[in-house]
Amino acid sequence: MRITSRVALGLGIFVLAAGLVLWFTAHERTGAPLLVILSVGFFYIARVLQGGSGHEGEGPAPDAAHGEEEAGEEEISPTIWPFGFSVAAVVLVLGVVLTRWLLVAGVVLVAACGVGWYRDLRGQHAHHGETGEVSP
């Protein structure tokens, strides 16, 4: 298990315990559920950092990349669009809380990020679908 996974798991356990103690001792109904939700987020991060495959401590073999390419799996390159979605989500939430024009801007940004991400992935799939053969 990687050290970052252990740290996230430890934080998840700590925040879950703090949330449960707050829930049962202070009878506070807002912060305690938020702490429990935060602990679930830390558990998810720990699982993702662990590798997500269920095979702890096993890394890919040095020749695994060649075997995957031969098996027909395509490799998708990283994209910036998830970050764009997160910025659009912040604008969307601020629009709900503060003013309507930010809400409209958030909706437009979410739509633009969706279209951009779709075009980016479609272009990558089209690029990987080429066989490299030249037809006469």
Image (cartoon, grey):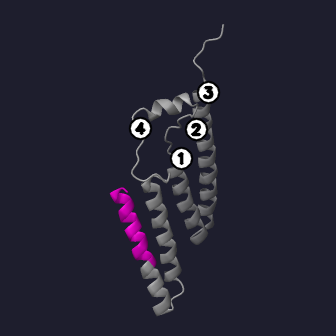
The residue beneath circle 1 is: 81
Query: Residue 125 vs residue 77: left or right?
Result: right
Residue tagged by mark 2? Answer: 120
Q: Which residue is mark 3?
A: 129
Q: Which mark is residue 122?
A: none
Crowd band around label 4 with a 10 angstrom C-alpha radius: few (<14), some (14–19), many (20+): few
Residue at 61% x, 53% y: name it. 110
Marks 2 and 1 close (CB-CB < 8 Å): yes
Of labels 1 and 3, earlier in sequence is 1
Q: Give the spatial CA distance, label 2 vs label 1.
A: 9 Å
Q: Amino acid at mark 4?
A: Ala
Mark 1 is on which residue type? Trp
Mark 3 Cα within 10 Å, few/some/many (few <14, many 20+)? few
Q: Is residue 25 left or right of residue 104?
A: left
Q: Is residue 24 above or below residue 43?
A: below
What amino acid does circle 3 point to?
Answer: Gly
Q: Are marks 1 and 3 in contact (CB under 8 Å)?
A: no
In front: mark 2 or mark 4? Answer: 4
Q: Nearer the viewer, residue 12 or 59?
A: 59
Which numbered disc, 2 or 4, marks the residue that appears first in the sequence? 4
Magenta highlight on residue 15: yes
In reply to whether residue 132 is colored magenta, the answer given is: no
* Circle number at residue 61: 4
In depth, the one of 128 and 57 nearer the eye is 57
* Image spot of residue 105 (x, y percent): 60, 57
x then y, percent, for residue 8: 39, 64
- Magenta stretch secondary structure, dominant: helix
Q: Residue at x 51, y 56 (%)?
A: 87
